[in-house]
Structure formats: C-alpha cells, structure tokens
Amino acid sequence: MEGELIFVGFIMLIGQIILMYMWNANWFKKENFKMQKQLVMKQNNLKLKKLEKDFGLQGATKIAPEAKGWGELLQNIDSDKIKDILSIVQGGDEESEGGIGDLINNIPPEVIEGFLKGAKNGKKEPEFTPQV
C-alpha cells in the first residue's frame, strides 16, 4: 500500500513539473507576441508619420467628441464632395469592369438624396424593446 502511494505521488510530481514547464513556455510565448505586436505598431506609427510628412498632411483627423450620431456627422457634407468621393471610388473617368463602381452606378440618385436628407434630419427610430 505504501509503495503504491509513493508511486502515485511520484507520477503526480512528474505531471506537475510537465504542467509548470508548459505554463512557462506559453507565458513566454504570450509575452514575446505582445512585444512583437508593440514593435509592429510602433513601426506602423512611424511609417504613418513619415507619409503624413511626405504628403504634407496635418495628421489623422478624428471625429469631434461632440458628434454623437451619423446625422450630426453628415450635416456638413456637401453634395459636391459626395459626388467627388463617388468618382474616386469609381476610378475617376475610366469605365470600370464590375466591382464597386457598377454597384454605385446602379443606385438611383433619388435614393442617395433621400438617404442624405434623412440623415441630415436626424430622425431616430424607436429603440427595440424586448417582450420577454
């Protein structure tokens, strides 16, 4: 009986050593991943700053904190700017063969104007109330 307890205790000790080794290996892998992620993020930030400097941009524009919804964000958009954005997405004056350009061409202008008017009015739909 005593020999069996010693054997079981020895097996448990080996199992604990293996588990501790696996835990340490995974922890070091996680830490290495975190450090590599931070390094890549810093490199990307440096590249973005270099591109901003090369193109003469003032920096990334952020949404104003007072803007609370799409309606407020779309209030100041000019229809000419929207047309310019759509022409850029379509690829300028070139004819596109499938893709986003064809999808945008298929949308009637009345639908776009209705969407913009609805967004500028800021009409809110009632919230969903569960009936449980």
Image (cartoon, grey):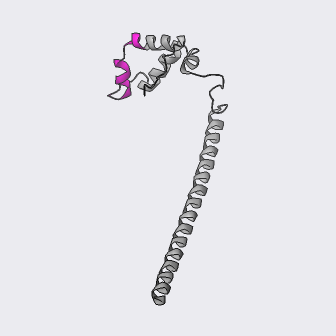
| Image: 30 above or below 65 | below
Quadrant of the rendered structure where residue 58 is?
A: top right
Name the quarter where the N terminus is drawn. Answer: bottom left
Residue 19 pos. (x, y %): 51, 71
Count of numbered labels shown in the rendering: 0
**Which residue is more in the foreground, 42 or 91?**
42
In depth, the one of 13 and 112 nearer the eye is 13
Quadrant in which residue 62 is drawn: top right
Whether residue 120 is situated above or below residue 98 in the rendered picture: above
Q: Does 22 appear above or below 65? A: below
Asked if residue 112 lies left or right of residue 66, the reply is left
- As displayed, is residue 126 above or below residue 96? above
Residue 34 image position (x, y, % from top left) = 59, 55
Helix, strand or loop for the magenta stretch, by majority: helix
Of residues 25 and 6, the one nearer the viewer is 6
The range drawn in magenta is 97-111
Which residue is drawn at the image coordinates 66% and 26% (left, top)?
65
Magenta segment: does it hold 121?
no
> Which quadrant does the C terminus fall into?
top left
Q: Residue at x 37, y 13 (%)?
A: 108
Q: Position of residue 104 (x, y in %)?
A: 38, 21
